[in-house]
Amino acid sequence: MSNAGVHSNLDKEFAAVSELWSPRVVAIANGQHVKVAKVKGEFVWHAHADEDEFFLVRKGTLTIHYRDRPKVVLREGDFHVVPRGAEHMTAASEECWVVLVEPAATQHTGETKSDMAKSIEAQMAHLQAQGGSDPTR
């Protein structure tokens, strides 16, 4: 299910994010989750075997480190697609606001086990709290 017709504002959605490295699903379209996240520091090394991952920086600077290729530095307005299967680690020296677009089934840290991982249910909990139906069905 999608939430076609949803209307919101990115700044409003980012204002609702209170925890670093905790993505929040803000829209669903064609089986893709559109998420916002605030990040600072380093995330865990991980890969998504079957999914590409789109990153767009709204505010700040995000560095995407790769094991097998040069790092990518994104500044406000820049975007990058991490190819499926590429092991990567994101980092930001100061708070950075990121928009992510990825298939609905994408696990936060791929197959990597980490305390930083957030389940898809946790990323969508605010939608359930608002009385919305489960957009994954």
Image (spheres, rainbow, N blue to C red):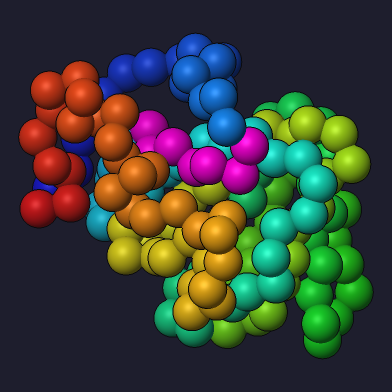
**Residue at image point 58% right, 84% down:** 85
Q: Quadrant of residue 98?
A: top right
> Is residue 32 visible to us here?
no
**Residue at image point 90% right, 74% down:** 70
- Please give the range of residues in magenta: 20-26
> Is residue 21 visible to us here?
yes
Q: Position of residue 116 (x, y in %)?
A: 58, 55
**Residue 10 versus residue 20: which sits nearer the camera?**
20
Q: Is residue 4 magenta?
A: no
Q: Position of residue 37 (x, y in %)?
A: 57, 37
Side of 94 relative to 86 (left or right)? right
Q: Quadrant of residue 3?
A: top left
Side of 71 relative to 10 (left or right)? right
Callout count: 0
Q: Position of residue 32 (x, y in %)?
A: 34, 54
**Residue at image point 65% right, 80% down:** 86
**Residue at image point 84% right, 39% down:** 61
In this rendering, the answer to whether 70 lies above or below 137 is below
In this rendering, the answer to whether 77 lies above or below 11 is below
Q: Position of residue 137 (x, y in %)?
A: 9, 53
